[in-house]
Amino acid sequence: MNSDMASSIPVGEPANARRRYEVTPADLPLSCPLPEMTLWNSHPRVYLPIVEDGGETVCPYCGATYVLKRDTA
């Protein structure tokens, strides 16, 4: 697994700490920064469109890529 990817975001992680995030349907509606992230040093929260079948999107503010992963369990 790439060190820039995570299947879950730790609560309190600084916003925009990574360039790529894996999110799940539980994270929808998708915003950047994610609600779990601290906001003190980040851009305003923006909601991002994402295709619900394995899609991905890029934040226009910070360039972070969000990839939607389906739970296969």
Image (spheres, helix red, strand yellow):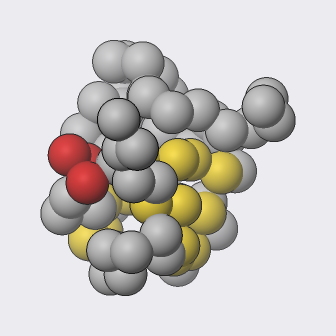
Q: Quadrant of residue 37?
A: top left
- Residue drawn at x 44%, y 28% is 9
Quadrant holding the N terminus: top right
Identify the residue at the far top of this view.
11
- Residue drawn at x 81%, y 35% is 2
- Coordinates of residue 54 in the picture (x, y in percent): 47, 70
Identify the residue at the far right of this view.
2
Residue 21 appearing in the image? yes
Q: Quadrant of residue 46?
A: bottom left
- Residue drawn at x 58%, y 32% is 6
Which of these two is toward me, 60 or 56?
Answer: 56
Residue 33 appearing in the image? no
Considering only vertical position in the picture, is 48 above or below 42? below
Which of these two is toward me, 71 or 67?
Answer: 71
- Coordinates of residue 71 in the picture (x, y in percent): 36, 44
- Coordinates of residue 47 in the picture (x, y in percent): 26, 71
Which of these two is toward me, 19 or 68?
Answer: 68
Q: Does residue 42 appear to the left or right of 62 in the view shown?
A: left
Quadrant holding the C terminus: top left
- Coordinates of residue 8 in the picture (x, y in percent): 44, 28
- Residue drawn at x 24%, y 39% is 35
Considering only vertical position in the picture, is 21 above or below 73? below
